[in-house]
Amino acid sequence: MRASIGWVVKKALSRLSHSVGVDRKRFAAMRMCCERHVLARVGRARKRYIGRILCYHSVGQEDWGTNDVTPSQLRRHIELALNAGYRFVSAQELARTGGGPKDLAITFDDGMKSVATTAAPIMKDYNLPWTFFPVSEWTDRKVDWIAPMVMDWKDVESLLAAGAEMGSHSATHPDFGKIELQQMVDELGGSRDLFEKRLGFAPKTFAIPLGQSMNWKTASMKAAKDAGYEVIYAQAEATRPEGTVPRTFVTKFDGDRIFNALLKGKFDHWEEWA
């Protein structure tokens, strides 16, 4: 069912993109939107025995594209989950124990500014535990184009002081499926070193940039363990790389119907760029 749905949607959108001249980025967004709506309607719900970790990115930063949700969406997702009987726990707890089927955790990748300014107050309103994964050299203002969009060290320190958990999202956010071993070592170790220099501790958890099955190699896992990481989070469920902790990707397209389908496991075999 999953393969046939994905294939049909992909082929239909491919024809459309060629016929009307849609650019690649817009086509990818169209395909994602269509796949999620189709799977929410006809996908198969799956029995779950462990908790689920939700993977968000930015909140109210439209320039972050499909990864961005609005503040009202984030609040709505939390309300839907609470009303459905879920309880929110830390990602660390689910990584360690697996949790139960009604346990949820919230994480944010990339270290976007809106996580500090918008998401954090929402999480505080609901008194929820949460985790964020900044990119160290983005936070250190070493990448000019993204500097206005990401949190700085004061933001990070403020979130940590307020009780949020933090892990690494690499030094520069490369695709680990496409880089060589030495660059992996530099990205993994360099990130921990910079965080320790700026914050006084080196994180032991790591969220894979892009996070899909093709974005992580066997060599990546060994390099991460050698660098001192103990837990590696993916951004996929059933298709995640071996040895990683699953997370469920949340998108800007996820209204009530899609979010409820997500909680039922209808996207567990879906990948963002598969």
Image (cartoon, grey):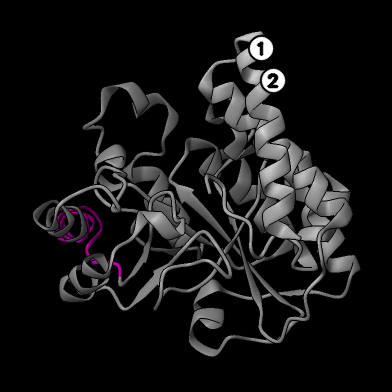
Q: Specify the farthest residue to the bottom.
A: 97
- For numbered disc 2, what is the local secondary structure? helix
**Label 1, label 2: how many angstroms apart (C-alpha)?**
5 Å
Part of the protein shown in magenta: 189-203
Q: Quadrant of residue 202?
A: bottom left
Q: Is residue 79 visible?
A: no
Task: Give the vertical position of 4 relative to 167 (above or below).
Answer: above
Quadrant for the N terminus in the image? bottom right
In reply to whether residue 200 is colored magenta, the answer given is yes
Residue where numbered disc 2 is placed: 16
Q: Are marks 1 and 2 in contact (CB under 8 Å)?
A: yes
Q: Is residue 170 visible?
A: yes
Q: Nearer the viewer, residue 237 or 166?
A: 237
x 54%, y 44%: residue: 115
Q: Which mark is residue 266?
A: none
Count of numbered labels shown in the rendering: 2
Amino acid identity at mark 2: Leu
- For numbered disc 1, what is the local secondary structure? helix
x 48%, y 86%: residue: 96
Q: Quadrant of residue 138?
A: top left
Amino acid identity at mark 1: Ser
In reply to whether residue 131 is colored magenta, the answer given is no
Task: Give the vertical position of 232 relative to 95 (above or below).
Answer: above
Q: Nearer the viewer, residue 5 or 107?
A: 5
Q: Is residue 213 left or right of residue 181?
A: right
Q: What crowding class fits label 1: few (fewer than 14 Cα within 10 Å), some (14-19), or many (20 or more)? A: few
